[in-house]
Amino acid sequence: MTITQYEPVHLAGIVALCEAEGWPSFGADLDRAHAVLTAPGVTSVVAVDGDEVIGFAYLLSDGHIVAYLSMMAVHHNHRRRGIGRELIEHATPLTGAQRVDLVTDTADDFYASFEHRTFSGFRIYP
């Protein structure tokens, strides 16, 4: 398994991971998904095993202080092996930020395993 920066060849694997999680946004428009993963201020990394994408993460950052973990997924057959942690630890220094913020509705125990402070938060939908 290797962690590397996102390239267009990884897009189909990322979309498959998102669809398996019930996240339809990337699969609805592949051009938009690629634009998101390569936008200014975005750091996107993938975990690959051979040619298979088994995990990915993308973070938004100001490049100095804060990064925001926008999305991360690991294939269900590869969980509990440290891949999620490796994705975050590989991507964070690439953002240039000093900290990573995130909102989650699952996986609280996983994120709590990192050194952290817990805050209350809201996600506002237009």
Image (spheres, rainbow, N blue to C red):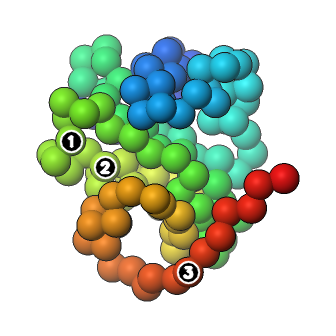
Look at the picture and state if 6 lies above or below 100: above
Q: Are marks 1 and 3 in contact (CB under 8 Å)?
A: no
Circle 3 sits in a helix, a strand or a loop, which is it?
loop
Residue 83 seen in render: yes
The Cα atoms of the two marked residues, 2 and 1, are separated by 8 Å
> Which image quadrant: the N terminus?
top left
Q: Which residue is mark 3?
A: 120
Circle 1 Cα neighbour tier, 10 Å, few/some/many (<14 / 14–19 / ≥20): few
Q: Position of residue 35 (x, y in %)?
A: 72, 30
The Cα atoms of the two marked residues, 1 and 3, are separated by 27 Å
Residue projecting furthest to the right: 126
Circle 2 sits in a helix, a strand or a loop, which is it?
helix
In this picture, residue 82 sits left or right of residue 10: left
Mark 2 vs mark 1, foreground winner is 1
Circle 3 Cα neighbour tier, 10 Å, few/some/many (<14 / 14–19 / ≥20): few
Q: Which residue is mark 1?
A: 79
Q: Are marks 2 and 1 in contact (CB under 8 Å)?
A: yes
Which amino acid type corresponds to the residue marked 1 in the rendered image? Arg
First of labels 2, 3 by sequence position: 2
Which amino acid type corresponds to the residue marked 3 in the rendered image? Ser
Q: Position of residue 104 (x, y in %)?
A: 47, 60
* Residue at 73% across, 40% down: 39
Q: Which mark is residue 84?
A: 2
Look at the picture and state if 112 lies above or below 44: below
Q: Position of residue 65 (x, y in %)?
A: 63, 75
In this picture, residue 2 sits left or right of residue 119: left
The Cα atoms of the two marked residues, 2 and 3, are separated by 23 Å
Which amino acid type corresponds to the residue marked 2 in the rendered image? Gly
The quadrant in which residue 122 appears is bottom right
The quadrant in which residue 37 appears is top right
Circle 2 Cα neighbour tier, 10 Å, few/some/many (<14 / 14–19 / ≥20): many
